[in-house]
Image (tube, grey):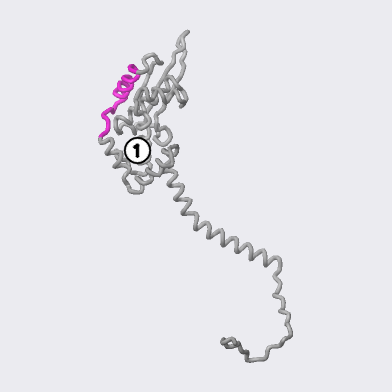
C-alpha cells in the first residue's frame, strides 16, 4: 500500500471532461505592435551591451595599428606591456637618450654619410629636411619625392627626402632606420624583397629598429611618449 496520503478536494470532481475555453483572439495589428515592441526592446538592450565593447575594440585597434602586421604572439606581448603601463619603460631601457641632429644641414650631412658608403652610384640627393607637415600617424617612415626637371636640353632628376620634425627627438638608431628606409627608395621604389635586403645591407638590425619605432609610435598614440 502506498504510504503517501492521496490528494483530497473540497468539492466533488466530475468524471466528465470539460473543454477549456479558447483564449481571446488578438487582432493582427495588436500582434504586430507587440512584436515590434519586443524587437525594439531587444535592440535597445543589445546596443547597450555592445556599444562599450565596440568602443573598446576600436580603441584597441587604434592603439595597435602600427604593429598590426606582426604575429599574434608579438601583438599579445605588446598588449601586456600596454596593460602594465611599461611599454615606454621598455624603450627607455633599450634607447636611453635621443640624437643631437637638430638642423636640416645636420640631417643632410648625416644622411650623406650612408649614401656615400652604401649608395655612391645612386641618383644624387638635392635635399634632406625635417618637415613639420609630415605626420607620424600617416608618414611615420618619412617621405621620398622624385621629379624630373628640364633645364635647357637636359633633363635633371631631383630627389628629396623629407622626415617628420617629430623625429628630431628620438634615439639615433630609430632616426637611422628612417634615413636608411628613404635612401633605399633611391634604388627600389616598391617595398619588395630587394628593398628590404638593401635596408638590411645598410643597417643589419633594420627590422628590429623598425619594430621599435612602431612601438614608439604606439606610445605616442597612447599619449605616453618616452622622449
Which residue is label 1 attached to? 216
Tell me the quarter of the picture where residue 5 sits. Answer: bottom right
Magenta run includes residue 112: yes
- Depth check: give the residue in front, 79 or 149: 79
Q: Against 38, is 113 above or below?
A: above
Q: Residue furthest front?
A: 1
Where residue 194 appears, as percent x and y from the top left, is: 44, 23
Q: Against 222, is 101 above or below?
A: above
Element marked by disc 1: helix
- Depth check: give the residue in front, 109 or 115: 115
Report the side of 47 relative to 120 (left or right).
right
Magenta run includes residue 23: no
Q: Residue at x 38, y 42 (%)?
A: 221
Identify the magenta region: 97-117
Q: Residues within 10 Å of mark 1 (few under 14, many from 20)?
A: many
Where residue 104 appears, as percent x and y from the top left, is: 32, 24
Q: Against 3, is 51 above or below?
A: above
Report the side of 96 relative to 184 (left or right).
left
Where residue 160 appears, as percent x and y from the top left, is: 40, 22
- Depth check: give the residue in front, 134 or 23: 23
Where residue 64 appears, as percent x and y from the top left, is: 42, 42
Number of numbered markers: 1
Q: Against 184, is 8 above or below?
A: below
- Depth check: give the residue in front, 9 or 125: 9
Q: Which secondary structure type mostly characterizes the magenta part of the structure?
A: helix
Q: Quadrant of the C terminus?
A: top left
Q: Quadrant of the N terminus?
A: bottom right
Amino acid at each position: 500500500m502506498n504510504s503517501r496520503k492521496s490528494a483530497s478536494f473540497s468539492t466533488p470532481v466530475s468524471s466528465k471532461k470539460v473543454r477549456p475555453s479558447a483564449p481571446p483572439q488578438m487582432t493582427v495589428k495588436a500582434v504586430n505592435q507587440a512584436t515590434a515592441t519586443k524587437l525594439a526592446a531587444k535592440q535597445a538592450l543589445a546596443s547597450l551591451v555592445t556599444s562599450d565593447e565596440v568602443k573598446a575594440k576600436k580603441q584597441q585597434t587604434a592603439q595597435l595599428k602600427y604593429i598590426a602586421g606582426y604575429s599574434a604572439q608579438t601583438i599579445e606581448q605588446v598588449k601586456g606591456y600596454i596593460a602594465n603601463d611599461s611599454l615606454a619603460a621598455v624603450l627607455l631601457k633599450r634607447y636611453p637618450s635621443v640624437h643631437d641632429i637638430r638642423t636640416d644641414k645636420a640631417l643632410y650631412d648625416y644622411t650623406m654619410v650612408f649614401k656615400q658608403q652604401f649608395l655612391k652610384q645612386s641618383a644624387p640627393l638635392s635635399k634632406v629636411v625635417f618637415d613639420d607637415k609630415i605626420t607620424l600617424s600617416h608618414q611615420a617612415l618619412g617621405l621620398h619625392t622624385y621629379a624630373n626637371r628640364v633645364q635647357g636640353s637636359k633633363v635633371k632628376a631631383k630627389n628629396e627626402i623629407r622626415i617628420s620634425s617629430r623625429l628630431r627627438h628620438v634615439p639615433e638608431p630609430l632616426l637611422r632606420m628612417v634615413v636608411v628606409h628613404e635612401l633605399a627608395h633611391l634604388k627600389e621604389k616598391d617595398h619588395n624583397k630587394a628593398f628590404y635586403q638593401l635596408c638590411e645591407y645598410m643597417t643589419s638590425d633594420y627590422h628590429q629598429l623598425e619594430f621599435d619605432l612602431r612601438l614608439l609610435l604606439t606610445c605616442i598614440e597612447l599619449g605616453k611618449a618616452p622622449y
